[in-house]
Amino acid sequence: MELSQKTCIPCGAGEPPLSELRVRELARGIPGWALSGGDTRLRREIRFRDFGSAMAYVARVAVIAEKERHHPDLAVEAGLVTLTLWTRSIGGLSENDFILAAKIDTVRPQRVA
């Protein structure tokens, strides 16, 4: 099953983060995302022509995040949106981060620079 077809499942406290091997396997399914933070985070930057377009995109991402009950860190600067995903309760990456990244990738940014 493709990542974008799965549903995020809450992680329990004490659950370990994904192994480096599993992280690398899942990362192949979300091109455009980069590992950061010592491979404990997923990060993506998307440029827009203007602030309004960036905010419209963020609003669409927020709908998906709420539905999945898994929320990215979002930074908006003029025409740049930076998304960062990680699972706080386990202090690293879970499959939920990859599922949400794949679902976010279904949102096509409008008027990208």
Image: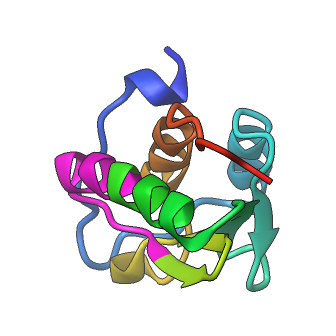
Say which quarter of the image contains residue 30: top right
Is 32 placed left or right of 48 in the picture?
Answer: right
State whether residue 83 appears in this view: no
The colour style of the image is rainbow
Q: Is residue 63 above or below residue 77?
A: above
Q: Is residue 109 above or below residue 61?
A: above
Instruction: Indicate the position of residue 89 as horizontal and vertical percent values.
Output: 33, 80
Residue most toward the top?
1
Q: Residue at x 58, y 60 (%)?
A: 18
Q: Nearer the viewer, residue 52 or 106?
A: 52
Q: Is residue 19 above or below residue 72?
A: above
Q: Residue at x 55, y 38 (%)?
A: 102
**What range is drawn magenta here?**
61-73
Say which quarter of the image contains residue 10: bottom left
Is 109 placed left or right of 80 in the picture?
Answer: left
Q: Across the whole image, how many numbered discs are drawn on residues? A: 0
Is 50 placed left or right of 14 in the picture?
Answer: right
Q: Is residue 14 above or below residue 61?
A: below
Q: Residue at x 47, y 78 (%)?
A: 73
Q: Nearer the viewer, residue 54 or 28?
A: 54
State whether residue 108 appears in this view: yes
> The C terminus is located in which quarter?
bottom right
- In reply to whether residue 93 is colored magenta, the answer given is no
Instruction: Indicate the position of residue 78 as horizontal and vertical percent values.
Output: 64, 81
Q: Residue at x 49, y 66 (%)?
A: 52
Instruction: Indicate the position of residue 14 as horizontal and vertical percent values.
Output: 32, 78
Q: Nearer the viewer, residue 76 or 72?
A: 76
Q: Main secondary structure of the magenta part?
A: helix
